Image (cartoon, rainbow, N blue to C red):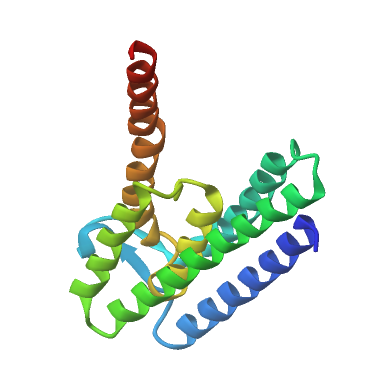
Amino acid sequence: MDIKRIRNYLMATVVACQIALLIWESLNGGVVTHHFLAREDMPGLSNWWGLVILPFLVWITAYSIEQRGQHLNDRLTHSKFNKVAYASFLAMLLISLVQSTVFILGYSTAAVSILMLLILIALFLPLYRIEAIVGYVLGGAYFTGPMIPFVGVVLFVAASVFAHFCIKPLITRLKTSNTVSE
């Protein structure tokens, strides 16, 4: 299945789910607004933003995957590339759903532990890629709104970017300089 068709199905699903969530919230006390530091006197972000943010993230993800896959000439390589992108998306979606469920059930320490584990995993896997980010945000958006998962994203993406673009090249450079001097 091509990326544009998947993008359209996913965008339609995201919009339908977000509209259903907003209708449910409206009928059950009003649309939730999440305040900074969980304090009512601080500015807040409404779940209405999910109608803009989530479809935009899906579109950006599909575009990014399409652009990264354009340079692949071999059909087998392109298929493998798509499978890795889908696996990354689905894994982060599942992790986020588990983390959100654990949090909603009252086990906030376990939810924080999952985030810390993600930060550790981000040192070894490229969780900075947009498909991982959108999977994580979509998984948490229906429990805590679309803005709250971005806090977790900032943490594990920062760790992943630092590890893959600073530490990894430094280690590679040190390895090559040691083998050249020997």
Left or right position of 103 against 68? left
Residue found 66% across the figure and 73% down from its top = 13
Q: Please, which residue is most extreme toward the bottom here?
A: 28
Q: Position of residue 164 (x, y in %)?
A: 40, 37
Q: Nearer the viewer, residue 113 or 73?
A: 73
| Depicted 144 relative to depicted 101: above or below | above
Residue 73: which quarter of the image?
top right
Residue 55: which quarter of the image?
bottom right
Q: Nearer the viewer, residue 102 or 72?
A: 72
Q: Is residue 41 visible?
A: no
Residue found 43% across the figure and 75% down from its top = 97
Q: Quadrant of the N terminus?
A: bottom right
Q: How many marks?
A: 0
Left or right position of 135 against 156? right
Q: Is residue 2 visible?
A: yes
Q: Quadrant of the C terminus?
A: top left
Residue found 38% across the figure and 71% down from its top = 144
